[in-house]
Amino acid sequence: MKENIIQKKSYDFALQIVLLYQKLCKANEYVLSKQLLRSGTSILEQL
């Protein structure tokens, strides 16, 4: 079965967003980090 490149790239992007979210939380940037997490991972809901 052929790999879905869009799904793979979207998942990898979402993982990077989660890591950035964790770093921002450590820097006490809660509002920005929550917005970034919601928007950066919303693509996964569409797949």
Image: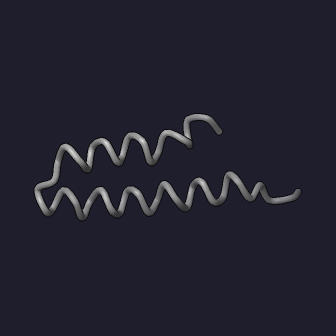
* Res 19 → quadrant: bottom left
* Res 16 → quadrant: bottom left
Above/below status of 1 relative to 45? below
Above/below status of 36 relative to 19? above
Please, which colouring scheme is shown?
one colour
* Res 28 → quadrant: bottom left
Quadrant where the C terminus sits is top right
Residue 8, percent from left and from top: 66, 58
Outermost residue, top side:
46
Question: Seen in the image, is 37 located left or right of residue 11?
Answer: left
Question: Seen in the image, is 27 located left or right of residue 13?
Answer: left
Residue 33, percent from left and from top: 26, 50
Q: Residue at x 31, y 42 (%)?
A: 35
Question: Seen in the image, is 21 located left or right of residue 27?
Answer: right
Of residues 10 and 1, the one nearer the viewer is 10
Q: Residue at x 59, y 54 (%)?
A: 10
Quadrant where the N terminus sits is bottom right
Residue 46, percent from left and from top: 61, 35
Q: Residue at x 55, y 42 (%)?
A: 43
Outermost residue, left side:
28
Number of marks: 0
Residue 15, percent from left and from top: 46, 59
Q: Residue at x 56, y 42 (%)?
A: 44
Question: Seen in the image, is 39 located left or right of residue 2?
Answer: left
Outermost residue, right side:
1
